Image (tube, grey):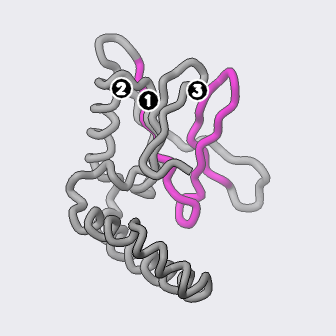
Amino acid sequence: MFPKHHEERIGGKRTFIAHGDLSNPKLYQYRAFRKILKNQLTYSLIEKVGPGFTRRVAKWLSQRSYKRNHGVLSSGPPPEFRSFAHQKFLEGFDMVILGHSHFPEEVEEKIEGKRYVYFNVGDWMDHRSFLRYTPPDGFRLERFEIGSLKGGEIGR
């Protein structure tokens, strides 16, 4: 597990991979909550209260967050994720893969004639989206079709 991000060379491309929760600088409340949640004191408390209670609290917080954020963001992915990816391209990454916004998205960008790609994996609950890697073709953002054992490509 990589707590913040991971850099990897995939298919010859320098790739930045992260959950994406730290990609949007406007999410001040989330960043404060994350600091409270991800520290040794909280981890110790979770260990003491056990998995049953911890799962119930986590599920409640997740549902609350999902309702709050998707009610506001339902029109599409926040532009901050594309801006974050663009900055990573300028830092030398060829590809950026994130997931926090829950909106499946594949964006191609050209900078000085070079092709860069940003993926947001989306989510399983609403979009049934996932990212598939198949050499030599590379990555494709797909959607699982119910009643089918294979995914279908999400339109760009």
Q: Which residue is mark 3?
A: 10
In the rendered image, residue 99, in percent from the top left (x then y), is placed at 46, 51
Residue at the spot x=55%, y=79% of the render?
47
Does dot 2 land on a helix, a strand or a loop? Answer: strand
Foreground mark, 1 or 3?
3
Find out whether residue 125 is within the magenta segment: yes
User: What element does badge 1 sit on?
Assistant: strand
- Amino acid on which disc 1 is placed: Val
Q: Main secondary structure of the magenta part?
A: strand
Please determine whether, in this image, residue 113 is positioned above or below residue 48: above
Of circles 3 and 2, the one toward us is 3
Residue 144 or 28: which is nearer the viewer? Answer: 28
The residue located at (60%, 45%) in the rendering is 142
Dot 1 and dot 2 residues touching (CB under 8 Å): yes
Which residue occupies 29% across, 66% down? 30
Write down the residue under mark 1.
Answer: 117
Q: Which residues are magenta?
A: 115-144
Residue 15 x, y percent position in the rendering? 48, 30
Q: Quadrant of residue 124?
A: bottom right
Q: Distance between the Cα atoms at labels 3 and 2?
A: 18 Å
- In the rendered structure, does residue 60 fall within the stretch colored magenta? no
Q: Residue tagged by mark 2?
A: 109
Q: CA distance from mark 1 to mark 2?
A: 6 Å
In this view, the residue in front, 111 or 21, is 21
Can residue 90 be seen in the rendering of this structure? yes
Label of residue 14 in the image: none
Residue 133 left/right relative to 43: right
Q: Indicate whether 137 appears above or below 59.
A: above
